[in-house]
Amino acid sequence: MVTSSPGEGEEKEGPVIRDRRRIDPETGEVRAQAAATPSAPEAPAASGDGATGTGDEISSLKAQLSERLSDLQRLKAEYDNYRKRVERDRVAVREQALGQVLTELLPVLDDIGRAREHDELHGGFKSVAESLEAITGKLGLVKYGEKGEPFDPTVHEALMHSLSPEVTETSVVEVLQPGYRIGERILRPARVAVADPDPDAGKSGDEADGRSGETGEAGEAGSGEAGESGGTAGGDGA
């Protein structure tokens, strides 16, 4: 009985190596299989018409790019203007709302000022008044109007008018009611009494000097006449 060893009649498995070199290392010739492989087609040489077409395309792209850049710049400018306008409107609305609230508080501030002038701010009322003035000051409320400052019709309201030799221009001589403003907005003009320079002030002084001179000359003349009359009377008596 003949026993066959395992593995007889079966092919041995192992790594398969394929030589795909185009040139035979022994002969140095190109192998037939590599020679049969078609080579890649060569790119056609650029003709003059193709170069011209490419230049036109580049010019067109540059024109489109310039147009898009101009559009973006214009859009950015419009957005910047819109943002500035919105910010300006927001500030204006805030000042308007704040001005309406502070305008309602002006009579209270006037009462506090009159009480202070008459020395009637005492105790808790004084603390409340000072707190209210401090809060309105933080909100931007500014009190103005001083005696002696030049009269400005844009911020002053003249209730009384007079002439005075003590001023050289139209000036405030008395503040009847102080004015208030917030920022550049006038909430209430200052109500004042104004005085203009007196045009007759210089003339009155000259006339007074003239009258004084005439009085002196008349006195001297009277004294001379009295002396002459005394001398004549003495002669007659003799």
Image: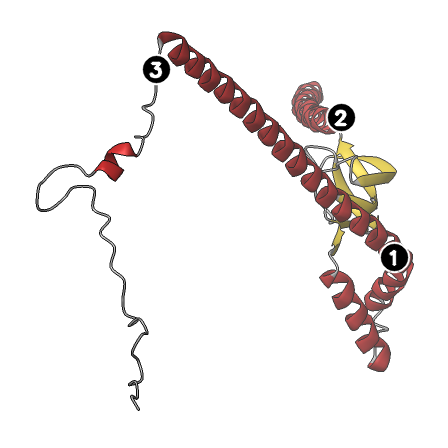
Q: Where 159 sits versus 73, above or below?
A: below
Q: Nearer the viewer, residue 137 or 174?
A: 137
Nearer the N terminus, badge 2 or badge 1?
A: 1
Q: Position of residue 204 (x, y in %)?
A: 74, 27
Q: Position of residue 43 (x, y in %)?
A: 34, 22
User: From the viewer's perspective, is 155 left or right of 27?
Assistant: right
Q: Nearer the viewer, residue 111 or 23?
A: 23
The residue positioned farthest toward the top in the image shown: 49
Q: Which mark is residue 200?
A: 2
Type of residue at label 1?
Val
Q: Which residue is mark 1?
A: 101
Q: Position of residue 170 (x, y in %)?
A: 74, 34
Q: Which residue is mark 3?
A: 46
Q: Residues within 10 Å of mark 3 (few under 14, many from 20)?
A: few
Q: Quadrant of residue 136?
A: bottom right
Secondary structure found at label 2: loop
Residue at 51% x, 17% y is: 60
Nearer the N terminus, badge 3 or badge 1?
A: 3
Residue at 73% x, 29% y is: 201
Type of residue at label 3?
Ala
Nearer the N terminus, badge 3 or badge 2?
A: 3
Alpha carbon of mark 3 to alpha carbon of mark 2: how far? 103 Å
Q: Nearer the viewer, residue 60 or 179?
A: 60
Q: From this viewpoint, is residue 180 visible?
A: no
The quadrant of the picture occupied by the N terminus is: bottom left
Q: Which mark is residue 12?
A: none
Secondary structure found at label 1: helix
Q: Where 217 sits versus 127, above or below?
A: above
Q: Please state which of the two labelled residues, at mark 2 or mark 1, is closer to the viewer.
A: 1
User: From the viewer's perspective, is 104 left or right of 65?
Assistant: right
Q: Residues within 10 Å of mark 2 (few under 14, many from 20)?
A: few
